Amino acid sequence: MFYQIIEHVHSIFRWVLLLMLIYAVLSAAKNIIANEKYTTRNKSLNGITVIFVFIQLLLGIILFFISEKVQFVPGMLKAAGLRFYAIDHSLGMLAAVVLITVGFIRSNKAKLDKTKHARIFLFYATATLLMIIFIPWPWKHDGAGWF
């Protein structure tokens, strides 16, 4: 029961997180083009996105240890489904979390507003692409669903 709840929350939460990331990336792109100031609203959006990323990471870590999809058994690397959840998905998403975190920190340390927006755009967009690649989409992986 606990496993199903965490799995569904993690799965639904991906949509919230993807929408937040896409909004943050588009907002940063618009602000770069329009040469806008980096406001507290921008910092709040980017910071809240980081918080949501870490919530999703925490849910993913819990699933990593309790999911039947993650099994370290002989021949696991040859079984595409087992390898995907244990290694590909986990490392790909961890890399995305690192990119988002580094992007937020580097953005806050930048002096120029345009540089702040550019760093958010670069790091968040790259992380979003990584997430899209490593999400277990229903048409690619057994046991994956939309929610």
Image: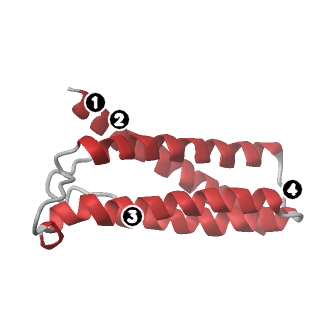
Q: Residue furthest right?
A: 111
Q: Amino acid at mark 2?
A: Val
- What's the residue at 52%, 64% (across, down)? 127
Tell me whether circle 4 and circle 3 mark residues in contact (CB < 8 Å).
no
Residue 140 visible in the displayed image: no
Residue depth check, mark 4 versus mark 1: number of the one nearer the observer? 1
Residue 145 locus on image (x, y percent): 22, 48
Measured Cα–Cα span from mark 1 to mark 3: 23 Å
Give the secondary structure at mark 4.
loop
Q: Which mark is residue 9?
A: 2
Task: Provide the residue designation for mark 4.
Answer: 37
Q: Residues within 10 Å of mark 3 (few under 14, many from 20)?
A: some
Task: Provide the residue designation for mark 1.
Answer: 5
Q: Is residue 140 left or right of residue 111?
A: left
Residue 48 locus on image (x, y percent): 63, 41
- What's the residue at 70%, 60% (across, down)? 28
**Earlier residue among tags 4 and 2:** 2
Task: Provide the residue designation for mark 3.
Answer: 91
Tell me whether circle 1 and circle 2 mark residues in contact (CB < 8 Å).
yes
- What's the residue at 81%, 43% (across, down)? 40
Q: Residues within 10 Å of mark 4 (few under 14, many from 20)?
A: some
Q: Amino acid at mark 1?
A: Ile
Q: Is residue 113 left or right of residue 133?
A: right
Residue 103 locus on image (x, y percent): 66, 62
Tell me whether circle 1 and circle 3 mark residues in contact (CB < 8 Å).
no
